[in-house]
């Protein structure tokens, strides 16, 4: 993907997320890792009305070169690219939102992960979603903790594509904006099912999860 294509795709995905209610107001951000740096949505920008020419362009050290002022979450995104990229060199896009049902679950969660494996597509397309304890937005300690978490899961053979920042929202990543958006969509839909289910659903059992591993290569 060229830089021009990346700019267009960030704006297309941002507009789609905004129009379907995955983001609101000026919450959320999207970045793409280029061969020689990064693109990221500007600080306090509405993802539904992005201008490709005004996206923040940064160098390989995350120092701004052009465009509107970069989102303060660039440090977190850079940590994700560093940690996830060591496990999958094709990691090219990070999306952060304040998606309603994910945040709602994080207000209630008692464990170390946001969701149990309640649907096959959550297991196949998203996988484990570690819950990161609350830090203020932009806190560098949160970025370091996310990177450590990605590394820890990777070392145990269960690479992840998402983390949940308690009270803030999910960060997801993949090889393109469209693929990262699909992870986010599946994650938010599973969170919605969990919030709406009374009594709470039972997770898939070990045999069912192993079938997903054997048939679809699920990392769980």
Image (tube, rainbow, N blue to C red):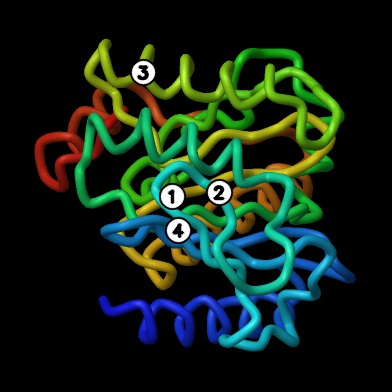
Relative to 20, is 128 above or below? above
Which corner quadrant of the image does residue 53 belong to? Answer: bottom right
Q: Are marks 1 and 3 in contact (CB under 8 Å)?
A: no
Closer to the chain start, of discs 3 and 2, is: 2
Q: Between residues 40 and 101, which one lies in front from this camera angle?
A: 40
Which residue is denoted by mark 3 in the rendering? 151
Closer to the chain start, of discs 4 and 3, is: 4
Q: Residue at x 50, y 65 (%)?
A: 39
How busy is the neighbourhood of tag 1: few (under 14 within 10 Å), some, or many (20 plus)? many
Q: Residue at x 84, y 64 (%)?
A: 44
Which residue is denoted by mark 1 in the rendering? 173
Closer to the chain start, of discs 2 and 4, is: 4
Q: Secondary structure at mark 1?
A: strand
Instruction: Give the Cα distance between marks 2 and 1.
Output: 21 Å
Instruction: Give the Cα distance between marks 4 and 3.
Output: 22 Å
| Residue 206 percent location from the top left of the image | 30, 20
Instruction: Give the Cα distance between marks 1 and 3.
Output: 14 Å
Which corner quadrant of the image does residue 33 belong to? Answer: bottom left
Disc ID at residue 63 = 2
Closer to the chain start, of discs 4 and 1, is: 4
Q: Between residues 187 and 27, which one lies in front from this camera angle?
A: 27
Q: Nearer the viewer, mark 3 or mark 2?
A: 2
Q: Residue at x 72, y 75 (%)?
A: 47
Q: Are marks 2 and 1 in contact (CB under 8 Å)?
A: no
């Amino acid at each position: 993907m060229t830089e021009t294509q990346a700019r267009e795709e960030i704006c297309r995905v941002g507009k789609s997320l905004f129009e379907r209610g995955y983001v609101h107001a000026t919450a959320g951000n999207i970045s793409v890792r280029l061969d020689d740096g990064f693109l990221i949505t500007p600080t306090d920008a509405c993802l539904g009305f992005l201008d490709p020419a005004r996206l923040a362009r940064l160098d390989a050290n995350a120092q701004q070169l052009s465009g509107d002022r970069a989102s303060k979450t660039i440090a977190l995104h850079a940590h994700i690219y560093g940690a996830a990229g060591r496990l999958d060199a094709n990691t090219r896009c990070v999306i952060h939102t304040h998606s309603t049902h994910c945040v709602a679950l994080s207000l209630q969660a008692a464990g170390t992960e946001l969701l149990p494996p309640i649907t096959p597509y959550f297991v196949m397309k998203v996988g484990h979603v570690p819950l990161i304890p609350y830090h203020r937005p932009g806190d560098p300690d949160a970025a370091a903790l996310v990177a450590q978490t990605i590394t820890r899961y990777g070392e145990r053979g269960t690479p992840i594509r998402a983390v949940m920042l308690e009270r803030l929202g999910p960060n997801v990543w993949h090889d393109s904006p469209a693929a990262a958006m699909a992870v986010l969509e599946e994650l938010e839909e599973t969170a919605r099912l969990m919030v709406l289910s009374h009594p709470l659903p039972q997770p898939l059992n070990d045999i069912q999860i192993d079938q997903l591993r054997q048939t679809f290569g699920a990392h769980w």
